[in-house]
């Protein structure tokens, strides 16, 4: 992206190019007369590489990894993409292109029916033909060449009206072509954002002559004709009697049917597309079925392909398939036509960027032993000793997200083996969610939303916003995060503000010719900006965790009146109170432990499960050093230094590979501390990073405050609804912090408190009731919980 001269904002501004050796994150960047943006069209970071720790063999293949990327707009057709030339060809080139695409048909329907007829035995007293009639809607799925071409042509025409362009990374597609020739079936995994997700992946693969996958759709399609069409293009639908995936899993026949269907699809070499969710854990059972088939030897291996789909604005058909409320997502022709009419009327020009990550072996990931699920512990074992007993050091281990996946119904292992296998499948789901989110491109609307929400909530001039867009773009590229936009700076900012205009207030001030942009202070606007800014939060999660840990220790200093914990030009005690230019020495061990405690409170999907929480916390602190926010100091042990908890032992630095090393094996080493590089200006940067996690932490904090006023026990759905209502009421009273009021935030907060032991679960008549546990019915324990969570929230 190169800035061109134009009548508008900063027409003389040019930014210096990206420098690799400068600090990656700096608040030193002033508004200069000339600003430059790095050339995004030629040199882009290599994204989508598989994990070097879990799948080193797959990583070493480096299929199609080039330094120069080429992108293709899926909605652009011309006669060069057909075998014909001429005036008439240019008018019907889309039809000719679709007709020339390769289709891999599948006779899997009859084979699955034969297998199920031979394996399943009707229960006593049941009619065998009636049972087969119940199975038919589930197995009546195949891929028809004629219908696939027609639906592909129709989807291209519809998407051309809905989106301005759909950019595909051709370099990644070459990797898929090479992986498909190796023999293992491909399993595409994406994070559920919109109903457009499961339609985009098959369409992209179809247009590039790759095998169209069988897609597992979580929606309940009501129209029989629409169900027939979808089933003939490889869409596996829910049974007509089930509203959600959880309702379908309650049927004793559903699980063995789906397991047999997956087995036959993979035996035939068919591709599969699965959507996963970090909030509800949906989609994880499909991965568990594949893992079970590999373990029992029915399937040799599969190649997992994370797919990152980025939208300028998530389509209005966005749904969050959530089993906790058992919503009925009924899709028919009327719903589809209403949505299409709305899209045509609004004439949106949003862009979509699709990244297919490098394929990797699921068998290699599971059998390498790099997932240490034996160290997974309940959250209450990890944090309750810290919260209630004021322990400084937390228990080492990984948090177990057991609620992300129910117990297996298709395995016959003993309970201990089944629990370990369940943790392994959860780890696979979390790793795929993390990998998919990592390879997503950051769109211009996401970048602008994060700046307005986390840095300029009270408003910003248009010229300063342009400067920050350039700054944040460079930071994203330095972190090997691809961006989904290009063009001049003025064009990018103008287009982003145009798409976000319903959620912004743009005004002109009489004292300046510059415009002022302010995020609209409403619930819907803030939630939209927060959703768009999520990809930026995932990119800076290390810095955000480290910043919250620094903020917690600084708050501790302030609450203790600074005193002897601060070194400031030799002053001690009350002499340094009120001095804002104090020089605080932050202990390395305390910073790491605060960061590690915060890691356990993060929502699922923010950190890879293959990395231990202590290593993640250490990386979080190191990232602040690399950014230039913290400066490491090495102080000899004979010099008295700040230690908040008066520790006598020194922190030693040992290599992670030497597990048997101890203090007695080496000489006493130097102690490391940190100080803030620019205390007078650090709040601006720290607040920007802390704001990225403030929405989640504040929702958790507000939830703990309302427990005193709730009449429990309550059914889980009603409990979450009351928490959501309380979050909205609290934000409305404060007229701010609306990003903490989403249903997702309420659900995540409740699940965290359940895992923490604050709420207890009791099953009554197939319904889960929640109540405050006896331990936290004591006001003293609740106050300790409040203080523990609020320490990470800056004021």
Image: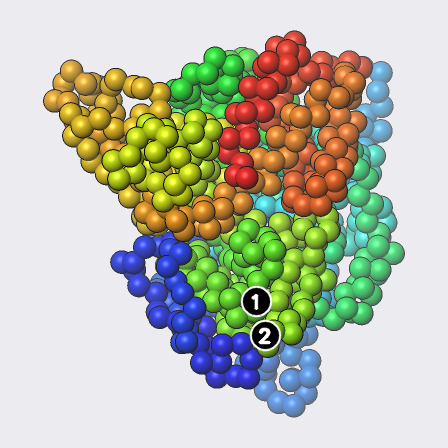
Q: How many marks?
A: 2
Crowdedness near tag 1: few (<14), some (14–19) or many (≥20) residues, C-alpha within 10 Å: many
Please name which of the two marks, 2 or 1, marks the residue nearer to the observer: 2
Which mark is first along the chain, 1 or 2? Answer: 1
Quadrant position of the N terminus in the picture: bottom left
Quadrant position of the C terminus in the picture: top right
Q: Residue at x 32, y 55 (%)?
A: 23
**Horizontal and vertical percent for residue 474?**
41, 62
Crowdedness near tag 2: few (<14), some (14–19) or many (≥20) residues, C-alpha within 10 Å: few
**Residue designated by label 1:** 461
Q: Nearer the viewer, residue 331 or 745?
A: 745
Q: Hey, which quadrant is residue 580 in on the image?
A: top left
Q: Residue at x 56, y 56 (%)?
A: 456
Is label 2 in contact with label 1 (beta carbons under 8 Å)?
yes
Task: Give the colour scheme of this rendering.
Answer: rainbow
In the rendered view, would you say 370 is above or below 89? above
Q: Nearer the viewer, residue 712 or 736?
A: 736
Is residue 295 something that shows in the picture? no
Residue 512 tag number: 2
């Amino acid at each position: 992206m190169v800035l061109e001269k134009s009548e508008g904002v900063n027409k003389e501004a040019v930014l210096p190019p990206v420098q690799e050796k400068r600090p990656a994150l700096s608040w030193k960047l002033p508004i200069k007369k000339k600003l430059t943006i790095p050339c995004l069209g030629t040199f882009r970071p290599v994204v989508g590489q598989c994990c070097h720790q879990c799948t080193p063999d797959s990583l070493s293949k480096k299929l199609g990894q080039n330094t120069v990327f080429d992108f293709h707009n899926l909605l652009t057709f011309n006669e060069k993409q057909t075998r014909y030339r001429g005036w008439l060809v240019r008018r019907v080139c889309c039809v000719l292109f679709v007709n020339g695409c390769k289709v891999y048909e599948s006779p899997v329907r009859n084979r699955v029916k034969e297998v199920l007829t031979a394996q399943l035995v009707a229960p006593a007293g049941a009619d065998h033909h009636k049972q087969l009639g119940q199975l038919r809607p589930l197995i009546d799925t195949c891929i028809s060449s004629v219908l696939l071409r027609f639906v592909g042509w129709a989807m291209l025409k519809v998407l051309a009206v809905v989106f301005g362009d759909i950019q595909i990374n051709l370099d990644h597609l070459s990797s898929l072509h090479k992986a498909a020739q190796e023999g293992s079936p491909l399993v595409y995994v994406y994070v559920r954002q919109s109903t457009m997700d499961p339609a985009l992946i098959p369409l992209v693969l179809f247009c590039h002559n790759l095998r169209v996958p069988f897609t597992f759709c979580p929606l309940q399609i009501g129209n029989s004709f629409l169900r027939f069409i979808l089933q003939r293009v490889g869409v596996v639908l829910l049974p007509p009697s089930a509203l959600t995936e959880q309702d379908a899993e309650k049927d004793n026949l559903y699980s063995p049917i789906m397991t047999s269907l997956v087995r036959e699809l993979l035996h035939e070499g068919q591709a599969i597309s699965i959507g996963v969710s970090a909030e509800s854990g949906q989609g994880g059972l499909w991965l568990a079925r594949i893992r079970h088939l590999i373990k029992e030897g029915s399937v040799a291996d599969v190649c997992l392909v994370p797919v990152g789909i980025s939208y300028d604005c998530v389509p209005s058909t966005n749904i969050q398939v959530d089993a906790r409320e058992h919503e009925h997502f009924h899709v028919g022709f009327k719903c589809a036509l209403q949505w299409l009419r709305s899209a045509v009327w609004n004439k949106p020009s949003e862009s979509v960027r699709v990244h297919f990550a490098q394929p990797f072996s699921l068998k290699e990931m599971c059998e390498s032993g790099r997932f240490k699920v034996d160290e997974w512990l309940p959250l209450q074992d990890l944090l309750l000793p810290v919260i209630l007993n004021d322990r400084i050091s937390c228990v080492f281990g990984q948090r177990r997200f057991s609620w992300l996946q129910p117990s297996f119904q298709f395995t016959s292992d003993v309970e201990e083996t089944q629990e370990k296998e369940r943790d392994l499948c959860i780890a696979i789901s979390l790793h795929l969610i993390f990998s998919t989110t990592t390879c997503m491109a950051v769109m211009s609307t996401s970048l602008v939303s994060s700046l307005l929400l986390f840095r300029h909530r009270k408003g910003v001039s248009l010229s300063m916003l342009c400067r920050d867009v350039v700054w944040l773009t460079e930071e994203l590229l330095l972190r090997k995060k691809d961006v989904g936009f290009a063009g001049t700076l003025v064009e990018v900012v103008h287009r982003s503000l145009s798409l976000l205009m319903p959620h912004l207030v743009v005004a002109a001030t009489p004292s300046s010719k510059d415009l002022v942009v302010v995020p609209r202070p409403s619930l819907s606007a803030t939630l939209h900006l927060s959703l768009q800014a999520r990809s930026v939060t995932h990119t800076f999660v290390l810095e955000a965790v480290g910043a919250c840990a620094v903020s917690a220790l600084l708050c501790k200093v302030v609450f203790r009146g600074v005193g002897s914990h601060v070194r400031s030009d030799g002053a001690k005690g009350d002499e340094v109170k009120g001095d804002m230019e104090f020089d605080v020495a932050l202990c390395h061990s305390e910073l790491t432990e605060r960061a590690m405690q915060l890691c356990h409170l993060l929502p699922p999907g923010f950190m890879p499960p293959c990395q231990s929480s202590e290593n993640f916390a250490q990386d979080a602190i190191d990232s602040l050093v690399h950014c230039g926010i913290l400066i490491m100091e090495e102080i000899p042990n004979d010099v008295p230094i700040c230690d908040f908890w008066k520790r006598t032992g020194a922190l030693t630095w040992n290599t992670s590979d030497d597990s048997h090393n101890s203090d007695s094996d080496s000489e006493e080493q130097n102690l490391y501390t940190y100080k803030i590089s620019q205390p007078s200006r650090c709040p601006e940067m720290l607040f920007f990073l802390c704001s990225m996690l403030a929405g989640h932490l504040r929702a958790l904090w507000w939830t703990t405050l309302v427990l005193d006023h709730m009449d429990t026990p309550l059914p889980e759905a009603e409990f979450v609804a009351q928490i959501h209502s309380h979050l909205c009421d609290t934000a409305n009273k404060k007229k701010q912090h609306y990003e903490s009021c989403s249903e997702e935030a309420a659900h995540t907060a409740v699940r965290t408190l359940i895992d923490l032991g604050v709420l207890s679960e009791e099953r009554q008549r197939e319904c889960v009731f929640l109540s405050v546990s006896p331990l936290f019915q004591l006001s003293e324990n609740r106050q300790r919980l409040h203080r523990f969570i609020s320490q990470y929230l800056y004021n």
